[in-house]
Amino acid sequence: MFEDETVDLKCPRCGHLNTLLVREFEQHAEVHFVCEGCRTGVRVEGSEFHDRLTALQKEVEELEREAARTTRKTRRPRKGDFQI
């Protein structure tokens, strides 16, 4: 669902913001990247991110179900409902 979204991660050494795809965190328990600012290798554990992403996906699914229930309950306007 969020695979094509990006996350900005700050380098612990120089503070440069590096952009990574959410897909990287979904596929692996940890992500390795090289900082674009200082060329330092950085390892990020994705377990906490993965837990939060799973919770967010569940919330979005619940919102979608709630929206579907809400739209079914409202009746369509009829010809006599409008005044000119």
Image (cartoon, rainbow, N blue to C red):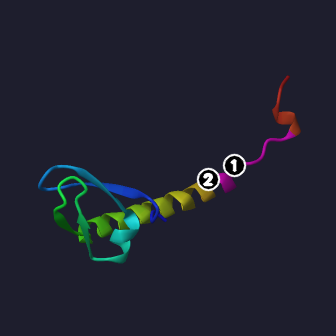
Q: Amino acid at mark 1?
A: Thr
Q: Is residue 75 covered in magenta? A: yes
In-image side of 74 versus 83 (left or right): left
In-image side of 29 versus 13 (left or right): right
Query: What numbered label is drawn on residue 50?
Result: none
Q: Secondary structure at mark 2?
A: helix
- The residue depicted at 39 percent of the width and 61 percent of the height is 56
Residue pointed to by mark 1: 74
Furthest residue in direction top, as rendered: 84
- Can you tell which quarter of the image residue 46 is in? bottom left
Toward the viewer: 37 or 82? 37
Q: CA distance from mark 1 to mark 2?
A: 7 Å
Furthest residue in direction bottom, as rendered: 28
Furthest residue in direction left, as rendered: 13
- Crowd band around label 1 with a 10 angstrom C-alpha radius: few (<14), some (14–19), many (20+): few
- The residue depicted at 33 percent of the width and 70 percent of the height is 25
- Crowd band around label 2 with a 10 angstrom C-alpha radius: few (<14), some (14–19), many (20+): few
Asked if labels 2 and 1 touch by Cβ distance under 8 angstroms, the answer is yes
Image coordinates for residue 22, horizontal then vertical, percent: 38, 64
Image coordinates for residue 17, horizontal then vertical, percent: 26, 50
Image coordinates for residue 18, horizontal then vertical, percent: 28, 55
- The residue depicted at 43 percent of the width and 60 percent of the height is 59
Residue pointed to by mark 2: 70
Image coordinates for residue 32, horizontal then vertical, percent: 24, 70
Q: Secondary structure at mark 1?
A: loop
Q: Amino acid at mark 2?
A: Thr
- Can you tell which quarter of the image residue 84 is in? top right
In the displayed structure, 57 sits above or below 10; it is below
Is most of the magenta stretch helix, strand or loop? loop
Q: Which residues are magenta?
A: 71-78
In-image side of 4 versus 7 (left or right): right
- The residue depicted at 84 percent of the width and 41 percent of the height is 78
